[in-house]
Every structure is written in C-alpha cells, then in structure tokens.
Amino acid sequence: MDFAHDETTKALQQTLTAFMDEHVYPAEPAYQEAVDAAPERWAPPPLIEPLKEEAKRQGLWNLFLPGEDGAGLTNLQYAPLCEILGRSLHIAPVATNCAAPDTGNMEVLHMFGTPAQQERWLQPLMQGEIRSAFAMTEPRVASSDATNIETSITREGDEYVIDGRKWYISGAMNPAAEIFIVMGKTDPGAERHRQQSMILVPRDTPGVEVRRGMKVLGYDDRDHGGHAEIDFTGVRVPAENLISGEGEGFAIAQARLGPGRIHHCMRLIGIAERGLELMIARAADRVAFGKPLSEQGVIRDWIAEARVRIEQIRLLTLKAAWLMDTVGNKGAHTEIQAIKIAAPATVEWIMDKVVQVHGAGGLSQDFPVAEWFAQVRTLRFADGPDEVHKNALARHEIRKATADA
Amino acid sequence: MDFAHDETTKALQQTLTAFMDEHVYPAEPAYQEAVDAAPERWAPPPLIEPLKEEAKRQGLWNLFLPGEDGAGLTNLQYAPLCEILGRSLHIAPVATNCAAPDTGNMEVLHMFGTPAQQERWLQPLMQGEIRSAFAMTEPRVASSDATNIETSITREGDEYVIDGRKWYISGAMNPAAEIFIVMGKTDPGAERHRQQSMILVPRDTPGVEVRRGMKVLGYDDRDHGGHAEIDFTGVRVPAENLISGEGEGFAIAQARLGPGRIHHCMRLIGIAERGLELMIARAADRVAFGKPLSEQGVIRDWIAEARVRIEQIRLLTLKAAWLMDTVGNKGAHTEIQAIKIAAPATVEWIMDKVVQVHGAGGLSQDFPVAEWFAQVRTLRFADGPDEVHKNALARHEIRKATADA
Amino acid sequence: MDFAHDETTKALQQTLTAFMDEHVYPAEPAYQEAVDAAPERWAPPPLIEPLKEEAKRQGLWNLFLPGEDGAGLTNLQYAPLCEILGRSLHIAPVATNCAAPDTGNMEVLHMFGTPAQQERWLQPLMQGEIRSAFAMTEPRVASSDATNIETSITREGDEYVIDGRKWYISGAMNPAAEIFIVMGKTDPGAERHRQQSMILVPRDTPGVEVRRGMKVLGYDDRDHGGHAEIDFTGVRVPAENLISGEGEGFAIAQARLGPGRIHHCMRLIGIAERGLELMIARAADRVAFGKPLSEQGVIRDWIAEARVRIEQIRLLTLKAAWLMDTVGNKGAHTEIQAIKIAAPATVEWIMDKVVQVHGAGGLSQDFPVAEWFAQVRTLRFADGPDEVHKNALARHEIRKATADA
Amino acid sequence: MDFAHDETTKALQQTLTAFMDEHVYPAEPAYQEAVDAAPERWAPPPLIEPLKEEAKRQGLWNLFLPGEDGAGLTNLQYAPLCEILGRSLHIAPVATNCAAPDTGNMEVLHMFGTPAQQERWLQPLMQGEIRSAFAMTEPRVASSDATNIETSITREGDEYVIDGRKWYISGAMNPAAEIFIVMGKTDPGAERHRQQSMILVPRDTPGVEVRRGMKVLGYDDRDHGGHAEIDFTGVRVPAENLISGEGEGFAIAQARLGPGRIHHCMRLIGIAERGLELMIARAADRVAFGKPLSEQGVIRDWIAEARVRIEQIRLLTLKAAWLMDTVGNKGAHTEIQAIKIAAPATVEWIMDKVVQVHGAGGLSQDFPVAEWFAQVRTLRFADGPDEVHKNALARHEIRKATADA
C-alpha cells in the first residue's frame, strides 16, 4: 500500500501545476466572460482551443487513459493530477482532454470497441476533435436499478432500432458531441444483469431528438455541453454499432463506472482544497464585531474539520486507486464504493461552510463556490445515489462477516 | 400561550385555501412558462395582475399588515395564512400583496413614515401599484455588523447626499420598484447603534445605477425583481426623505426585521409541507430493487424526521408570533432569533432529502424543489447569518443565567 | 391549542418550586452520600420518607394521576410540573409518588383493574407504601415487536402458569416492589395484537427469581430499584390476577405507554434545563487560553442551539399533552411518537455538550451530568427504539398522504 | 507514503493474532468474572500474569517501544499491532506490556531519563514488574491550557517540594503503580511554555495521598487501576528526581503525547472493528417486524457508514505514523492532531450505532459495547478536548495559507 508519488508523477505534478499557474487560472475570468456573453452556446468558449494545444504540447493530454494510447499512467499516478485538474473545473479537464464523460467513453471504446469503432470514434475523441455523451439515465424510472431501464434496443435484420427517452445526458447539448453511447435493453426477459446492451448512436441519426438542457440547482452547465434530455424514436443504426455483445451492457457500465467514480472523487478533492483556500482567505479578510472571522471559534472549527476531512478522503481515494492498479477494478469494488459515498458528502459539508463564510457572495456568480456546491451536490446522485451504494456496501460487509463466522 | 386558530383565522384559511386551489396552483405552469419565455423581464409575468384583482376582491390582501390600514390581523392570525402563501412562493405572496421586501417596507412607512411619505409611497404600495426595495447589504463588508456599513448619507443644506454600493437588494431589478429605502451612516462617529439612518431614494434619482442582478445558486429570481447590485453616486434627495430621524436607522432595522424574519419562517413551513408532500408522492411512485421507495427504511426515516421537525418549527413560530402580539417585538426577541436559527436549518435538511428522493429530477427545472432548496439556503444568511444570531442568543442566555445566579 | 398555564398549574408550579428549593435540592448531597454508603441497598435511602410525607402534606402527591383518585390534573397541567420533577431525577419523582414505573402501573390498575385488584395493589401504590414493576422486555428477542414475546401465560384450571425470562425490569430489584405486571402470550396463534395478555404476579410467588441487576452504561440505578433480570419458572397465580382479559395485553400496553412516553419527555426537558444551567455556569467559570469558555464561539454556539432545541421539544410536548387531553391518547398518537423521537435525541445532544464543557469532570461522579447522559441515552430504547417509532410514524404519514391524494 | 506491512509486521500480526485467538479472547469471560468478584481490587486479576509470561515468551512484549530496548518497531509497524490489541482492551495491552499510561511513561524515561532514573524505574516497568502513572490533569482548572497548572514544584536545597491536587490520574489506584510522573510549575513567572517541569514521585513518599477513584460514565475502570484523585501536600523528593531540567515540562509533555495520542487512535480502530463485527452479528441474528435487522435499510446505512469511516481513520492513522517515522513527531504534528480529532468522534458515532442495534443489551454488562462507548467518549477529552485541538489545527492552517499567499 504505497501511495508515494513516483518520479513520473512528481514531474507531471510540476508541469501541470505550472500549466495551471501560467495558462489555466489566468484564463478563468476571460472564460467566464465569454460564457456569459454567449447564452446560446452549449460548448466551451473558443479560447479553450489554444489551451488544448498548449496542454498537448506539454504532454498534459489524455492523462487519464492507461496504456500506450493514453499517458500510460496508473490510477495512483493519475489521482494527484486529477485533483489538480479539479481546482479549475471549467477549464482544466477539457484543456487536457480529461473531461467527463469523454474519459469514460474513451475507456469503453478502448476496452470493448472493435477496431472499426475505435478508428471511427476513439481516434477523434483522443485527439480532442469531437466530444461524446453517455446515455443511461431515464426520466421515468429509478435508473440506479438497471433492471428499470425502459429504452429498447431491438434487432431488426442488420440494424438495431432504439426507442426511449433519456435525460441528464451530460455534454450532449454540445453539437460537437457527435457520438452517444446508449444503454438499453435487448432482452427484457433475460437474467437481470444480462438484459442490457450498449450501442453507438451518432448524434445525426434520424429519430434522435436532443430536446432541451436540464438544469442542476439553476445552472445549465452550458459550457460543458449541459445535460440533455433526448428522445430516441425508431432510431436505426447498423448492427456493428453494438458494443461488445448483446447482454454486455451492465458489465460495461460497471467497468466504466469504476474509474469514472474515482475521477469524480479526485476532482472533488481539488475543489475542496481550493474551497478551503478561499474560505481561509475570506475569513482572514473580513472583520465582524471587532475581529477577523478567522479568529472566531466557529469558523476555526470549520477550517479544522475541513482539513481533517480532506485528508481522510484523499487517503481513501489513493487507496482505491492503488487497489485498482494492483488487484483490478473488481477487487477495488468496496473501496470505490466507499469513496463514492464519502467524498461527495464530505466535500458538500465543506462547501456549505465555504459558502457560509462568504456571506451572500457565497451564493453569487462573483465567486466559484456556489457553482462548486451545485457540482458536489450532483455527485450524491450521479452514478447512483448514496443510498444505493450504502445498501450494496452493507450487504457486502454482512456477507463477508457471515462467511467469516 | 394560546395558539388556536380563532374564527377570523379559520375563515381566512378556508378562503385562502380555496383561492390557492382555484387560482394559484392552476396558474403555476403558465406562470413558469411565461417566466421562461421572457428572459429579459425582471418582474412577474402579466398573468399575476388578474390574480391580484381576485385576491383583493376576496379580501386576501395586505394580510400581513396590522391595524386598520391592512387586514388587521395579529401575527398569530397571520402565521397560518403566511404558511399557506409559502406553498406557492412565486405567485401567492405577490398575488396577495404579501411579498417581501414590500411587506417590511410598508411596515416601516406605516410605523415611521411622515404623512407625506405615506401618501407618496405607502399608498401605492398598499394598492399593489408599485414595488419597493430595501438597500442594506454591502458587498465590501460583513453587513451583519451594522457598524461596518460604508454607505454615507451626508446632509448638505436641504438635501442628503448618498454615496455607496449595495448588493443583493431583492426586487430592485424590477422597474416597478420605484422606491428604495437606503441604510447608510449619517454620523460614523456616534455610538455604534446611532451612526445609521434610513432614507427614501426614488429609483429615478440621478446617481442611482442599478448595475446587475446577483444570483443565488444559479437562480436570478427574475420574476421577483432579482437581487440587484446598485451604485449610489452623489445621489441627492430632499431632507424630508429621511425616515424618522438621524441615527434611527439601526432601531428601524430592528423593528423591520422582527416581523420580516418570522414571515420568512412561516413561508418556510409552507415550503416544507409541500416538499414533504412531493417527497411522499415520489417515494410512493418510484420502484427500485423490487419495492417502492416509500417502503425502504432510510426513506421512511427521512419522512418521519421531516414530520417531527416541521411540527417543532411550526410551534416555535407560533410562539414567537404570539409573543410579538402579547409582549411586543422586543419581548419576543429571543424567540424570533430562535426561529430564525431553527427554521432555515431545519427546512434545508428536509429539502435536501426531498431533492434526494427525486433523484436527478430533484435538481432540475421540472420540479420546484431545487429552487426551494436555493431559497432556503439563502435564509441562512438573509437578515444576518446563523452564526451571528446564535452568538447573540447565547450572550443573552449567559447574561440571564448570571443575573439569576 | 392553548398551552397557557392555568391558575391551578401556576399555583402548583409555585408550591412545587418552593418544595424543590426547600427540600429537594438541599437533600441531594446527603442522598448521594447515603446511596454511596450502602452498596447493597436497591432502594432509595431512608431520607426519602420524610420528603414523601412533606410532599403529601403539601398536596404534591400523585400529580400524574388524572381523576378523583389522583391530583386530577390534565396532561397539560402536569407537563410543567413533571418538567420540574425531572430537574432532580433521583429524588423529586419518588418524593411525590410520580416515579416510573409506578405511574404507568397505577394507570393500568386505575383504568383496567378489577375492584379487588385495585383494593389489593392500587391503594398501597397510591399511598406510596409499596412499589411495582412492569415486566415486558425480554433478553432473547427484539421486544419492540410484541409478536416476538416468548413468555407464556397458560390457563390451567383456576390458575395461570407463567414461564419466561424478562430483563431490564426497572425498579424490580427493590424488595418493596411487591407486585409485577407481566406481559406474556396467552394465545400465540391469535391475530398479532391479540396474542398477548397482562397478569399480576406478586413478587413472592414461588418460581419468581429476581436474578441480577442489569446496568446502563456502568450505572446500576440502585436507588431506583435497578433494572432486574427475572426468571419466571412455572409461576402460578389465580386466574383473577389477569388484567382486563385474555388478548388485551397489547391494547393495555399501548394505553400505558402513551402517558409514560410523554412523562419521560417532560422529565427530559427538566434535565435539559438544569444541564444548560450547569453548562453556562461552568463556561462562565472556567478560563482557557486567556478568556472564559463562555466567550468562546463554539461554546456559545452550543448554548444557543441548546436553548433553541429545548424550546422546540417543550412546545411539542405541550402539544402532545394538550391533544391527549382533548382528543385522547389515540388521537394524539402521532404527536406522542413525534416527541418520543425528538426529545431523547435532542437532550442527548445537549447533554453531550454539557459533559464536554465540564471536561473530565463531566464524566465523573462529582457532577450529575454523566448520569443524566446515561439516562437520556437509555430513552432512545425505552418503550421501543427510535427506529421503530420513526418507521411507524412514516407509515402513518404515507398512508395519510395517499388517502388525501 | 508507503503504508504496506513489511515482513516483520506481517509476522508479528500473525503471531499476535494467534496469541489473541489462543490466549486473550478465551480469557475474557474469566477475566470479567474475576473483576466482578473482587470489587476492592484496583488492579487486573491475577490471571493476567501467565498471559504476560506467554506474551513475553512469544516476543509480543514492549511492542510500542522503539529502539533496542523495546521491540524496535516503527510507528507504522506498531500501528496494525496496536489495533489488534485494542480489540481486547482489558487484557491485550496489559498482557503485552503495551498499556497506557506505562507506554508513555516508559518513553519519557527512555528519552529523557538519567541512567539512574532508568535503572531505578524504567527497568522494572519494561519488565512488567511495576506500573506507573502520569499526573497532569487538575480538578480546579482547564488543564488543556498548560499555563493553568496550579501544582507547584519548588526547589528547597537538594530537594523539590510538590504541592497540588491532581485527578483522573489513570492507573494510580493500583498499588503496583509505584512511580508517578508529576507535572507542575517550577517557575510561574517564566515564558508560558517554560514554566512547567516534570518530576518523579514515588507513590510511597510522605504527603502523597491517593484519595479516591474517579468514574467515567459510571465505570471505575478498576482493573486498570482506575483514575485517581491525588493530593500532593508538601511532598519532598530529591532534586535528581527532576526529569530533564527545569522548564522542560511542556516540551516533555508534547513529546510524550505524540505517540500516546496515536496509540489511542490505533486501539480505537480495533474497538471499532470488533464493534462492527458485533453489530453485524446481532443484526443478522435479531428479527423484528418480519425480517432480520440486517435487511432493514437504516441498519444497513449504519453498517456501510461504519465501514467507510473506519477505512478513513485507519488510513489517517497510518499516515500520521508514517510521518512520525520519517519526519519526526514535530513534523507529524498536524496529522497527529487530525487523527486525535477524527478518531474519537468517528468511533463514538459507530459505537452509538453498535449500542443501538443491541437494544437494551447494548448498555448492559453482558456485552462490551457500553463500556467501549464510555472509553471512546473519554477520548474526546483525554490529552485535551477536541475543541482545543481544532482551534490549534485551524490556526496552523490559517498561518500556512497566509504565508503561502
């Protein structure tokens, strides 16, 4: 259980930190201004492109992707880098081609795609030329239970026909999101985890209607391509668009979600650290009733708790990453669940305090903290609500204990 | 300590409930649509006007205002009505001319205004012809400490000159908000609670610049006139625009905040009740892992806790209202503080669970719950952050205990 | 919903407060000393007797018992008196013959006893000549589910034969507890709430073995007769010892628990108030790092929260009491559950802070606060764990909402 | 940051686990019985002696002590072993000569003792022949602030004279505790952290009066030598009994507390793990309302949270241990504080749930969980209350952030 940063990691941390200092943080005000100025654009402002070029030039590209096609990092190596990316959530992940949901989608194509699928979709994604979306959640059912999925994928001759409604499909409002990975049922009568399949649906296929952007706590996340509601009505794609095989949907989702969940948590730690910095700076700056907030007991309590809690979730994230590297995603299942449970709740608590120390400004557009709060809150649902993960983890503990006894 | 609803209250409850059922709830979808369709309008959509007429016709008008000029209700009588108004936060308070900040402003003019001030501003406010704003909070200082206020109100001959920047001035983006009550310092050298004064500043006075709408967690609250940032630069108004007298600002603010705080809490209870209804309905409707959410232990725990907590804050609110009626706002000071501390935190907890039971939809624009969450969260700052109130209440407890001993 | 104290209540409050000041508080040190000095005595020290005489003389006797036989108070009248009794938990309830479990047992005999049963047991209990116990909880099953009860009550001729093990039978270690009300099953095959019966078992009946005193967090509660584990082995009592009728056990338990639960909550409020007093006194007295604890922000936060929370549970208790008086125990069911859920959790939170402000002394025998903590903690189980009550209350809410819809 | 268990650790884990299985767990019932049977004995029952012999024989002795004199383990090596010891808190630490407060006292003598002091006291302590106590806390002052210490240590010729009252001196009721390390002030006028000194006071010195055992939540911890209140009245010891030098008391305390705090946390993790095992076993065993507790949502939530939280505090403890090994106790200061804040609060939360799942039995003497709760609760004060640590940690964070900026 060695969490030390090796030389590769340290070098990348240094390069990435410099990149953040020189290119990312300074771009934040202009980025925000450009977003505000173009209320119809569901994509990052154009200034992201030179940042992408620069990141690519510096080798800060596809850091998330293991193996020769990506940066070749382990999860443990990527974790502290991903944390740094989380500090500038709008810009840094996109600039380095490490943004969700492309990361997960690239992993799916990398692991399960046919050469043709990889050639057609993985290559442009890895180059940052196009974007993608992952269409799983449905408005009409509790989608954390995969057996509830209502979208159908029906074989007809050489084609599959897709029918269903999805929502909260992140990134899909962005016209650059040219390809959707759609989860649906090919065999509703099969065993519960063999009913689902995944299939590639190009955005411009007839019958695909991107209806509207869903909001999260008032935010439309426009610059990230929003969160689309999409109707699939009699959508036909060639049979070779199926990923892996019929009935493999659940297994692919599991494989995809492992790294996806931990990446979320890594980024959350970056948000938490930057939030804590802002909280301390504000507390040191503001005076009320005769002394700075930073000398008031309750505020100090929050600062201490924030530090203590960040330390804990970072270590748990590192352990999960290390396990994924050493025993595989399946072996790391409990730890991935654990961090998925702990990190959002912890960082939500911290962010609530960061907001409170900022007073009304904490909920405003003048500081990033309200939006961070919204992001963090979302993660108590994304990839399944806390309650589902806790129930599963407990069941696992009970079984293990019973087996031991 | 009699909290029973008397006949007047019961009759009004019945009338108001019928008004909600017949006019308000049915108008909600069209209201929302009209708001969405006019992104530049910082005011309620026109459909509010017939609702106002109807409410006035039914005697559901100015319910908040005691005495002959208003509905003549006590706080205890108003409390259960205000709770009902809170159930449809966008429409009901405005439709009945019971919306903040007008309510507080009318009370200020009612209690402290000269006949001329009342004639000019109170009358049209009471008729619902114009709106108003209350300009206290400043971006550059911790405004919960009134000695921090930086806006100056300087006497020059027959005029006062106002200079300063305010923000989060609710309702002020609405052009119909024709009059602002501005808090500033007339004498920075005076004793700490005699430095401040309040003055009436018509919106169209030269030097008044309404700069932009501030957001709360992604919402601009456009249909309520938003939350403006306003610059006052060499703004000159006649000396008779001063309210009450120089140095009276803090006292007026205290007088205004008492009812204002409790009105917020009453409305919160209405939000909480409607939230609980939605939570139960959703839980009964959604099935996951083989049974409805409403049969799952954790969800039940939330429902029970929600009910238990709502009961407690309602009773505390009624007690505060009853005290205000019987011993006055000053005598009810501790209870007003107590409910200001308890209600937002309690309803925030409940609303978090309401959101969670709704899944991703809970943060979306398709249900009112995300917006309610944002409203509730705001009230942990509005009229002073929790921490300031707790500190004051504790100081009072310690003094009382020490005096007893 | 009138919670005001009427003249009767006010007069009794005054008398009782004077009795506490003159007789109860001054007796606390000698009481504790006497308890410590007699480690084998499972009963209050003899000094309790003159206090009982004095209380009886002053009309402070059987205050809990409605009707002509008792003090004739309503629940609403008793509530503020019971709160005062809670302030000196060891002495005041016993001194006024208002101590559990006798109160509940007297109510059972009062409501359901035959004249002969009343003559034989209720009379001496009401005179404070004997004590009693209520034998429901069993060590081997989750006793909050009455269908789990394993103790059997079998009719044989003119007798019933009782077999089973009970534990946590409060007061039963005291030899003065001459009569036990035992819950068991007369018909395990009946409908779930008709299987149980209650029967009177005199302590000295052959086959009754009081085995040992159970502890709560290290305390044996010796002076209150402890909490006994009792074996009933082939215990025979006359058939006329049955209370009410076969199959009535569950209904009697429900009737008994209503007042019992609310009495616990009333006393808890008294404990909380006295705890808050001690917390403030200690905080004002102790200096650390240059200033009294009472000027440190975190401590102030606790004091404020304690006050705000006490207010809420007191009002909820009063509402439950008022409902019991006006619509009966059944009609007050939800409110009784609500206060049973809220009060122990709230006062436990407060007592934790009271302990913390006292430092190590807070856990010691030199202050009453550690023992209060233990008492309060116990009430999260007594008469059913929180979780059972929450589940039932939620089910009720869901049904009501579904029926409304 | 390598937390992996090396070969030495793994071998010792295996040996220790076998020792626990063969000797410690089986001895628990007899141990408890012997303790109950001898209410006057303030020491472990005699059956501890053969266990000590066996542990020594197996090399499971003085595991805590670094260097050649002890087992020579690093903190990181000791951590998982100490966790195992925590699983049987009464027996295992004493049996392996790894029990507080001897561990800390041996470390003090090891680091700061003169050869004569080591010869006289360290040797028999290391052999397990005598016990010791550490007399710091005083009843009359908030002792977490070392400047409050009132005990005086006054030089008179070749002697020091000690006057003062201490309490909660763990282990000191045990007559085998032959030596006390006493903290007092040699120079009340010196700089705040140079006023204090430590001195060795043999138990049998005239003027030493061990007055009584203090309780914690009803427990006297008799078998661990209790927690004594001790008067020192004109106690004279030779000047060479001073440890290190005048004014060194605070520095020695800091050095002593580092390892002491982390040992507490390690043991807490062992308690938490065993508590979780008991919780799961009980939940699987008990049926209520038609299904085992282990299938009820709220209980599963607790089990999952317990696992997630244990993982986090274990990792934080390992990090603190690793830092102590690599950069020293001073460099690990923040992490030691962090774990001292996090571990007791976390394990208290877990233990509360363990108790609750056990119903009334959870507070009884039939399960170890009530006593564990009391132990854990104590650690929110021991070595300074949470609030003091949080305040210090926050100050450190603020300084660091300000220095960075």
Image (cartoon, coloured by chain):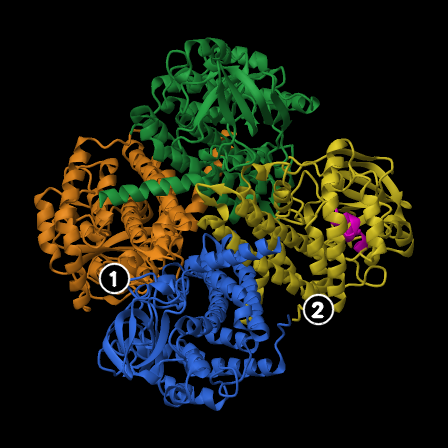
Chain colours: A orange, B blue, C yellow, D green
Q: Amino acid at mark 2?
A: Val
Magenta range: C91-108
Query: Is the residue D166 above or below the residue D300 in the image?
Result: above
- Rounded to the nearest angstrom, the CA distance separating label 1 from label 2 is 55 Å
Query: Is the residue C166 above or below the residue C277 in the image?
Result: above
Q: Position of residue D279 (x, y in %)?
A: 54, 37
Q: Nearer the viewer, residue B70 or C151?
A: B70
Residue at screen point 85% across, 55% down: C57
Viewed as shown, does residue A137 lie left or right of A366? right
Residue at screen point 70% across, 67% down: C5
Query: Is the residue C51 above or below the residue B380 in the image?
Result: above
Q: Amino acid at mark 1?
A: Asp
Q: Nearer the viewer, residue D156 or C161?
A: D156
Which type of secondary structure does the marked residue at label 1 adopt?
loop
Please check the rendered image and state whether residue C103 is part of the magenta-colored stretch, yes or no. yes
Please check the rendered image and state whether residue C120 is part of the magenta-colored stretch, yes or no. no
Question: Residue tagged by mark 2?
Answer: C327
Which type of secondary structure does the marked residue at label 2 adopt?
helix
Residue at screen point 61% across, 62% down: C316
- The chain carrying label 2 is C
Callout 1 crowding tier (Cα within 10 Å): few <14, some 14–19, many ≥20:
few
Q: Position of residue C131 (x, y in %)?
A: 82, 45
Q: Which mark is residue A366?
A: 1
